[in-house]
Image (cartoon, helix red, strand yellow):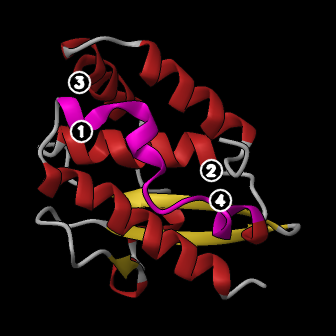
């Protein structure tokens, strides 16, 4: 887990401590914590990065603040699992440098044990979100 930003390491450890259905409940708690798209981005939805690999419409925007990235997500409220993934990434990665983000293993989420309670197709969604976040981070190197 040493390639993960400290906040993401903590989240991964918290998930790995959960058993069975607790993991899904914990993910749904994260879904409720995802902040709404900031007002200043509301009119710019068309310019946000879309994660086409997700069945749910997922849009991501990266903002560079003094060399550290902040990500903003636009995901419908009726997609709690996807919102939970985004919230884990939002909380775990925001404030990291582009270099730190690019070092995150593509399948870091397997350390969380989510594959025991979520289908592979849904897990591909978190991987796709991370891939797009890395692409956005690459632009700030």
How crowded pointer 1 is (Cα within 10 Å; few <14, some 14-19, many 20+) is rated as some
The answer to which of 22 and 110 lies nearer the viewer is 110
Question: In the image, is residue 43 above or below residue 129?
Answer: below
Residue 111 lies in the magenta stretch: yes
Query: Quadrant of residue 11 in the image?
Result: top right
| C-alpha span from label 4 to label 3 | 26 Å
Residue 50 visible in the displayed image: yes
- Check the picture and name the quadrant holding the N terminus: top right
Find residue 17 and report its horizontal and vertical position in percent: 45, 13
| C-alpha span from label 2 to label 4 | 8 Å
- Determine the secondary structure under disc 2: helix
**Between discs 1 and 3, the one toward the N terminus:** 3
**Between discs 2 and 4, the one toward the N terminus:** 4
- Determine the secondary structure under disc 3: helix
Q: Label 4 belongs to which residue?
A: 70
Q: Main secondary structure of the magenta part?
A: helix
Q: Label 1 belongs to which residue?
A: 115
The residue lying at 15 percent from left, 52 percent from top is 120
Find residue 32 and report its horizontal and vertical position in percent: 33, 29
Question: In the image, is residue 16 above or below residue 90?
Answer: above
Q: Nearer the viewer, mark 4 or mark 1?
A: 1
- Check the picture and name the quadrant holding the C terminus: bottom right
**Between discs 2 and 1, the one toward the N terminus:** 2
Q: Label 2 belongs to which residue?
A: 93
Find out whether the residues at labels 2 and 4 contact each other: C-beta distance under 8 Å: no
The residue lying at 25 percent from left, 48 percent from top is 82
How crowded pointer 2 is (Cα within 10 Å; few <14, some 14-19, many 20+) is rated as many
The numbered mark at residue 103 is: none
The answer to which of 127 and 27 lies nearer the viewer is 127
Find residue 90 and report its horizontal and vertical position in percent: 53, 48
The numbered mark at residue 24 is: 3
Q: Is residue 133 left or right of residue 140?
A: left
């Amino acid at each position: 887990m040493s390639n993960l930003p400290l906040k993401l390491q903590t989240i991964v450890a918290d998930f790995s401590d959960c058993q069975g259905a607790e993991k899904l409940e914990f993910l749904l708690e994260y879904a409720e914590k995802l902040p709404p798209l900031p007002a200043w981005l509301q009119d710019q939805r068309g310019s946000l990065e879309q994660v086409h690999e997700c069945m749910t419409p997922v849009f991501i925007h990266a903002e560079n603040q003094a060399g550290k990235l902040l990500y903003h997500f636009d995901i419908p409220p009726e997609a709690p699992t996807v919102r939970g993934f985004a919230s884990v990434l939002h909380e775990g990665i925001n404030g990291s440098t582009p270099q730190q983000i690019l070092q995150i293993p593509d399948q870091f989420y397997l350390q969380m044990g989510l594959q025991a309670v979520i289908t592979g197709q849904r897990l591909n969604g978190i991987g796709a979100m991370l891939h797009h976040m890395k692409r956005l981070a690459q632009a700030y190197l």
